[in-house]
Image (cartoon, helix red, strand yellow):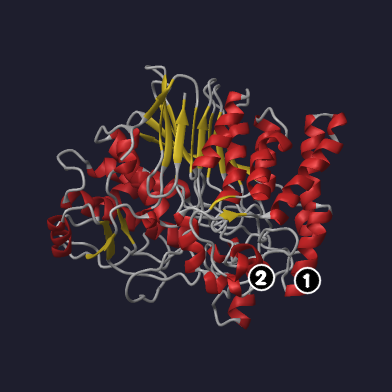
Amino acid sequence: MRPTLYGSRHAVSAGHYLAAAAGFAILEAGGNAVDAGCCAGMALAVLHADEVNFAGVAPIMIRTAEGQVATIAGVGHWPSRIPPDLFMRKHGGTMPVGILRTVVPAAPDAWLTALRDFGTMTFGEVAAAAISFARDGFAVFKLLADEIALHEADYRQWPSNAAIFLPGGRPPRVGERFVQEDLARTIQFMADEERAAARRGRLAGLEAARAAFYEGDIAAAIVRHQEEEGGWLRRDDLAAFRCRYEEPVRVRWREFEVLTCGPWCQGPVVAQALLMLDHAGLDGYGHNDPAYIHLVTEVLKAAFSDREHHYGDPLFVDVGLDRLLSPAHVARRVAAIDPRRAMPDLPAPLYGPARHHAASPGMPERDGDTSYCCVVDRWGNAFSATPSDATWRAPVVPGLGFVTSPRGSQSRPDPAHPSGLAPGKRPRLTPNPAILVRDDGSVMPFGAPEGDSQVQAMLQVVLNAFHFGMDIQDAIDAPRFITQSFPSSFAPYRHFPGLLVLEDRIAGATGEALGALGHRVERYEAYSRKMASVEAIYRDAPAGFVRAGADPRQPAYAIAI
């Protein structure tokens, strides 16, 4: 549908074309990949206003030109005072939509941490585009219009949400101007506080912008709203919060080092699936032929079983990731795959007890959110970030224009679950930025939105590019498939055993052959956002070019020069 874009200097790819343009302008002004990535990421919190939230989550991975890798766990923790058995005791083991899902908002601190330690510009400079898009508005695009209409009833639950997302009492239409004045004032206030402290230097200014959000007037308004609505977040939760640097997960796959975020998110699924597929062997398989789709699907089921039974905040849970990525575990998982028959559900865990999950009928509704952006600059720095948090899951803070992170929806109500709720514990995220590093010095930041589909689409793009030899855009455009044979990461954690969904461009005969193998095959449209939207930039070191691609499944665009 689109060509791969080639450039000799730098490139940006982002989930909306205006975010890509904003990040590119920062590069052209002399900023580095981190400056540009933070600019694009904050812009996405305005442009993808339904599914990215300025006060949400923003996990970030950075690889410097010198080879240093930093992973900023841009996800907040549960309030320190919340009872760990709250949802089991008062809500029958369910997690109601609304204020009780609130965790500490992490995204503002994540952007500021990245800028402080790896950027060169001020918060005000990189936030200027987000402020402008919020204050002056932008044209509503189809995905935004469709998603707000889909969640109209959710937005109507809270007058503060309806005032922004249902202007004039109805969902906005394609081509209308969408304005977020309160959000513009909030971000501008942080920039103004930075400017007032600028005489003490750039770092003091960045710290002042952080204090404006986590300690000053914004924090006071957040906590007042929490107290009025029955939430648990308090001033000390906000004031003490800092995003953690976490070690990346590193595995060898062929001539690549695969860098993913840790098991506080689902990132290691990509690494484990690549190891399993290499152990199984892919030689002789045709792209998207029935045998190939069957093998990848069964491998993903095994990796999702390990995610379900072991992943959680490693500050609270002994995940045992080294064991899950070990050659012995990989070999045992692959040996259990039958090339002639699909597993009817998740395979059992190899360590510890299995957990029972009731099956859900039919097809899943779209429950993803999130966007993505990546940057490679002229010096060779790479930036990868997956900002998120839907604005229809909880109330907007009146006057501030954002929802205080409802990412608690990705914790389990049962504290005994590895990703179960506990005070101070982080939910297990779906957003998971990643980077590939090739032995020849080439680097590829990549990632995607869309919940549990993210890692599946990311895996397929890597295989398309580096096993089947497709160029970056072709690897992104190629038809996809996803399994739903595991409990969803989102409350209410629906589970569809055996369900395999194909994009409609995959041949009918292929679907029939997969059905004969025991998969319950369903279809999405030809280019479905439910299959995720991968953005990627490949810095080809031997050739001296950057190659950029962006997924046509949403209004994502890349720019390279």
Residue 38, x across and y down, in percent: 61, 38
Q: CA distance from mark 2 to mark 1?
A: 10 Å
Whether residue 270 sits left or right of residue 114 in the image: it is left
- Tell me the residue at 67%/72% (across/down): 159
Whether residue 22 sits left or right of residue 444 in the image: it is right
Asked whether 312 or 220 is in front, the reply is 220
Residue 254 higher or lower than 484, as above or below: above
Residue 500, x across and y down, in percent: 27, 61
The residue identified by callout 2 is: 99
**Total residue callouts:** 2
Q: Secondary structure at mark 1?
A: helix
The N terminus lies in which quarter of the figure?
A: top left
- Tell me the residue at 62%/50% (across/down): 137
Res. 466 image quadrant? top left
Q: Secondary structure at mark 2?
A: helix
Whether residue 265 sits left or right of residue 457 in the image: it is right
Answer few, some or many: residues within 10 Å of disc 1's Cα (few below 14, many 20 plus, some between 14 and 19).
Answer: few
- Tell me the residue at 58%/78% (across/down): 88
The residue identified by callout 1 is: 227
Asked whether the viewer can see residue 192, the reply is yes
Q: Amino acid at mark 1?
A: Glu
| Mark closest to the chain's N terminus, 2 or 1 | 2
Residue 273, x across and y down, in percent: 34, 47
Asked whether 88 or 537 is in front, the reply is 537
